[in-house]
Image (tube, helix red, strand yellow):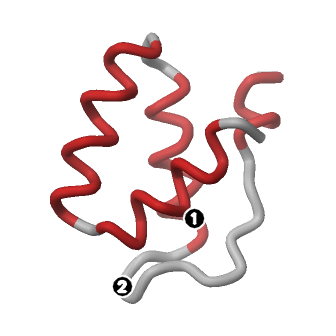
Amino acid sequence: MSSQAASYIEVEDQPAGWSSDDIHKITWVLDCHGQESRNIILVHIREINEELWGILVSKEGA
């Protein structure tokens, strides 16, 4: 549970078509994977939506 709480991020400017809840769900899925898998998933997200990717990557170190 604590990793989920730590991953819960405030999203002020979410990409068009994506809700704050969507961002939280994606972050939770990323938290379920090791760093190598996370990087692969993030590469695919970047191909689909660079704005969404930027939000997720900016929260990686947070």
- Residue 36 vertical position relative to residue 46 in the rendered view, above or below: above
The amino acid type, in three-letter code, at marker 1 is Asp
Mark 2 lies on residue:
17
Amino acid bearing label 2: Gly
User: From the viewer's perspective, is 16 left or right of 54?
Assistant: left
Q: Is residue 61 above or below residue 13?
A: above
Q: Residue at x 35, y 14 (%)?
A: 36
- Residue 33 image offset from top left, x and y in percent: 43, 17
How many residues crowd around disc 2 within 10 Å: few (fewer than 14), some, or many (20 or more)?
A: few
Pointer 1 local density, CA inside 10 Å: few below 14, some 14–19, many at least 20: some
User: Which part of the image, by quadrant, shows the C terminus?
Assistant: top right
What quarter of the picture does the N terminus occupy? top right
- Residue 9, percent across and down? 74, 55
Which residue shows up at 42% across the image and 66% down it? Answer: 52
What residue is pinned by disc 1? 21
Spot occupied by residue 43 in the image (x, y as percentages of width and height): 25, 42
Relative to 52, say whether 17 is above or below. Answer: below
- Of marks 2 and 1, the one in the foreground: 2
- Residue 37 in the image, given as x and y percentages of width and height: 32, 18
Kindly indicate the quadrant of the structure image that contains residue 2: top right
